[in-house]
């Protein structure tokens, strides 16, 4: 919701296309099962990740990490805290 | 017999290997989650029989969905069995994550790395170093190479004779230095001390199933959620260390990334491209290629087989009902379906190509935004698209949906996708009335099914089946061109299935329909002795229900009932009731002419033909689909969906029939004006409604927030 307190971290949701980011933390907002699945898929602290594409309404993302591609919605992108790789 | 478990991530070629090892023909595709239930088959390796168990793909030993649970339970209950772990070479790092899980379990693992047969590999791997590092047998193979398959069999034999239970990876030692880890270990009572580490790790990861099984929740030890990600990180750190030694990346692009995606995934082009592809598929199937081969086959069946058979029967025995059985019951009944064989096979062929190509994952990505609004998941695209082939097999794939409500909804909507068995109905009935413009009619019918499904999904989302879909995650497979061998395989497989279906269910139904339709209750043969056939008496009793829809004749009604067994029987029943003469002109033309004639058992007007086609599109799924639905979504939802379908079919057919009749009286212009007026009224109501609804909302954010 728009009235929620704004996240005080940079999430993958607001990341620019085709820019390398590093995962800082995966937040717990979507429950521990999501933490686990993202962990299984390799989204853990320190993973390099970049957004390749966004869908029609910009709500679904295509990202690349560990040499493969994955697509998920912005609700998941929002819980992935990232920082830019310099 | 010893069991060998086939374990691996989704879409790594497990079923392909299963087919090659056991020489079977299970369904495969370039999509994750094609296999949704375990499959088992015997195979021989080195003189010993083994049973290979193919399982749904998993990412780790903690299941998050229905079909994953099957695989995980199987692994945890069979730790002494040989585990054939398949990894995709192109995505080795991610695939090794599951392998580490198996190593923690101390299982007898054979790591088989699949090169996926592609020339453009994304990784190179040093097998010997990997073998050394992991301490298990590693084998690099190409699933289509006979030599590799034979070598793999020998390895399976060797490892099952002399099991080599793996040592836990080195990071487990590091874990043992952790305070919480030891606390958990000390509080666990497990007989098998080898598995102590594995279960302790799973508890640290908060695996609810294992915590429950070991009754650890009673221990009252609090575990921080942070460990879930920490352990994943420890495993991935180990893998990245491994890959520095053994794996070399050979491509710049990521696996699944492709240059064509620039166009196919373009925000504005993706959906038009999809519609274009579908239109092309339907055009090729129904009109150009498919129709050409259909008419060839139809002539062949009638002139070469049918005419000779019937004339031969007539020459040796002159009993009218025997000739009738062969001419109408068998030749007309089977011929009317069999002549659609090229079209049905072609449709399945195109669907398989779509499935194999890797395009469906892109489609799920493009549709996710829209489907989310409808309360479905992007993954529903796969199930719904397969529904154009066969509803029963498609409904089964709804299993890989994330949450229960999306699964029920997707399975319920599958029958609205017009399945291949309904194809002859539109071709025969539509063709009789609309000739060349039937292309447009057929496309509208398919579209109508999709639109009804979308509206129904929106209604269900707002009422009974609100989806809690929070976790759409989908991997992108790379584009793959099907090999020539695979194309032949798809065609022969579909041909075989279609012919078996015609030879069994449809043949039996045709004979039953012919018997009931040709004999009266007093067992008199109606065409010669006169009287009223059994189906006519029953049909006449039910037919009044359909008078408002325009097809209240007994033949059309009986065909609908017979069609519940298999939808193909609708057309064959019509051919049987109206009868043909094998020595006259083309069989399909005879059937089409007879339904124009009001003295036939089944006859239509243009309006009632349209309404009949709409009714057939939706009215009820066939028995096979009903039983799948019953198994997948429960009896309650199956009954509800059947009732909904019947009601929608009835209402829509009623509207179509009367609208067409009115239109032919008042002309189209009148209706365009009426439609325009209706649209204006609806739009203004929506606008006013939205305006009123927004009044009591927070001015700052536009939503109903508490302050």
Image (cartoon, rainbow, N blue to C red):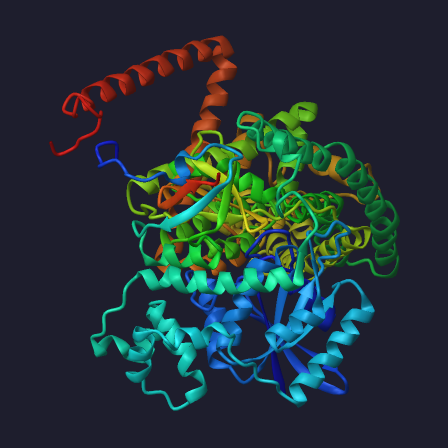
Q: Is residue B686 above or below residue B277?
A: above
Screen quadrant of the C terminus of chain B: top left
Q: Is residue B298 left or right of residue B602?
A: right
Give the residue displayed 39% in from the left and 62% down from the top.
Answer: B230
For the question of whether residue B605 can be seen, the reply is no
Total numbered circles = 0
Q: Is residue B587 above or below residue B567?
A: above
Q: Quadrant of residue B275?
A: top right
Give the residue displayed 22% in from the left and 78% down from the top.
Answer: B218
Residue B241 pos. (x, y %): 56, 62
Q: Quadrant of residue B604?
A: top right
Residue B344 pos. (x, y %): 69, 46
Tell which residue pokes out farthest to the left in this image. B707
Residue A65 pos. (x, y %): 53, 48
Give the residue displayed 82% in from the left and 46% down from the top.
Answer: B302
Q: Nearer the viewer, residue B174 or B468?
A: B174
Tell which residue pokes out farthest to the front in this image. A86
Q: Is residue B468 left or right of residue B350?
A: left
Give the residue displayed 45% in from the left and 13% down from the top.
Answer: B671
Q: Is residue B423 above or below residue B637?
A: above
Q: Quadrant of residue B500?
A: bottom right
Residue B492 pos. (x, y %): 77, 56
Q: Nearer the viewer, residue B680 or B437?
A: B680
Q: Nearer the viewer, residue B201 or B338?
A: B201
Screen quadrant of the N terminus of chain B: bottom right
For the question of whether residue A6 can be seen, the reply is yes
Q: Is residue B475 left or right of residue B576?
A: left
């Amino acid at each position: 919701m728009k009235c929620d307190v704004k996240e005080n971290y940079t999430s993958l949701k607001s990341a620019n296309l085709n820019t390398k980011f590093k995962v800082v933390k995966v937040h717990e907002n979507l429950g521990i099962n999501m933490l686990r699945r993202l962990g299984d898929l390799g989204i853990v602290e320190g993973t390099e990740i970049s957004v390749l594409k966004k869908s029609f309404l910009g709500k679904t993302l295509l990202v690349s990490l560990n040499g493969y591609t994955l697509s998920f919605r912005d609700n998941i992108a929002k819980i992935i805290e990232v920082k830019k790789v310099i | 017999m010893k069991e060998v478990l086939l374990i691996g991530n989704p879409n790594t070629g497990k079923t392909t290997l299963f087919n090659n090892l056991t020489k079977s023909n299970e369904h495969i595709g370039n999509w994750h989650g094609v296999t949704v239930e375990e499959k088992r088959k015997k195979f021989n390796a080195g003189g010993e029989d083994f049973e290979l168990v193919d399982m749904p793909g998993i990412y780790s030993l903690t299941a998050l969905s229905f079909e994953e649970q099957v695989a995980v339970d199987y692994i945890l209950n069979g730790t002494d069995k040989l585990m054939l772990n398949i990894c995709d070479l192109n995505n080795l790092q991610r695939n090794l994550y599951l392998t580490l899980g198996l190593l923690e379990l101390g299982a007898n693992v054979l790591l088989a790395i699949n090169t996926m047969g592609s020339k453009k590999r994304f990784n190179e791997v040093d097998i010997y170093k990997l073998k050394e590092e992991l301490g298990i047998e590693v084998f690099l193979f190409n699933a289509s190479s006979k030599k590799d398959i034979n070598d793999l069999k020998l390895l399976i034999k060797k490892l099952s004779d002399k099991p080599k239970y793996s040592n836990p990876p080195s990071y487990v030692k590091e874990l043992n230095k952790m305070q919480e880890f030891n606390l958990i270990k000390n509080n666990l009572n497990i007989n098998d001390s080898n598995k102590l580490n594995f279960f302790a790790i799973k508890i640290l990861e908060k695996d609810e199933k294992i915590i429950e099984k070991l009754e650890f929740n009673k221990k009252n030890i609090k575990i921080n959620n942070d460990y879930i990600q920490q352990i994943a990180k420890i495993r991935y750190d180990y893998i990245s260390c491994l890959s520095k030694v053994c794996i070399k990346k050979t491509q710049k692009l990521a696996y699944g990334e492709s240059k064509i995606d620039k166009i196919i995934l373009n925000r504005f082009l993706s959906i038009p491209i999809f519609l274009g592809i579908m239109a092309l598929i339907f055009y090729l199937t129904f009109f150009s290629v498919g129709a050409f081969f259909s008419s060839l086959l139809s002539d062949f069946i009638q002139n070469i087989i049918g005419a000779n058979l019937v004339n031969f029967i007539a020459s040796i025995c002159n009993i009218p009902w025997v000739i009738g059985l062969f001419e109408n019951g068998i030749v007309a009944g089977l011929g009317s379906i069999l002549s659609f064989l090229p079209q049905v096979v072609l449709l399945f062929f195109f669907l398989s190509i779509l499935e194999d190509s890797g395009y469906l994952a892109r489609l799920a990505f493009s549709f996710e935004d829209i489907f989310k609004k409808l309360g479905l998941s992007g993954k529903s695209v796969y199930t719904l698209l397969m529904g154009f082939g066969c509803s029963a097999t498609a409904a089964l794939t709804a299993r890989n949906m994330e949450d229960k409500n999306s699964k029920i909804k997707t399975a319920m909507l599958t029958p609205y996708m017009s399945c291949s068995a309904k194809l002859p109905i539109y071709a025969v009935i539509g063709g009789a009335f609309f000739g060349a413009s039937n292309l447009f009619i057929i496309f509208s019918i398919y579209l109508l099914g999709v639109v009804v499904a979308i509206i129904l999904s929106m209604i269900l989302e707002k009422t009974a089946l609100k989806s809690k879909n929070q976790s759409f995650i989908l991997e992108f497979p790379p584009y793959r061109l099907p090999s020539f061998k695979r194309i032949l395989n798809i065609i022969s497989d579909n041909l075989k299935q279609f012919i078996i279906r015609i030879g069994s269910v449809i043949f039996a139904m045709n004979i039953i329909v012919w018997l009931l339709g040709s004999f009266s209750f007093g067992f008199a043969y109606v065409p010669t002795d006169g009287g009223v056939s059994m189906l006519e008496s029953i049909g006449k009793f039910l037919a009044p229900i359909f008078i408002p829809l325009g097809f209240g004749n007994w033949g059309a009604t009986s065909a609908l009932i017979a069609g519940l067994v298999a939808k193909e029987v609708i057309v064959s029943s019509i051919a049987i009731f109206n009868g043909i003469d094998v020595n006259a002109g083309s069989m399909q033309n005879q059937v089409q002419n007879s339904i124009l004639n009001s003295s036939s058992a089944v006859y239509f007007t243009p309006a009632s033909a349209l309404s009949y086609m709409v009714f057939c599109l939706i009215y009820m799924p066939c028995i096979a689909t009903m039983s799948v639905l019953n198994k997948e979504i429960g009896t309650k939802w199956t009954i509800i969906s059947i009732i909904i379908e019947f009601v929608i079919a009835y209402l829509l057919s009623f509207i179509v029939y009367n609208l067409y009749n009115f239109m032919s009286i008042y002309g189209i212009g009148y209706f365009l004006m009426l439609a325009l007026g209706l649209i204006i009224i609806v739009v203004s109501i929506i606008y006013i409604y939205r305006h009123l609804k927004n009044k009591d909302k927070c001015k700052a954010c536009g939503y109903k927030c508490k302050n």
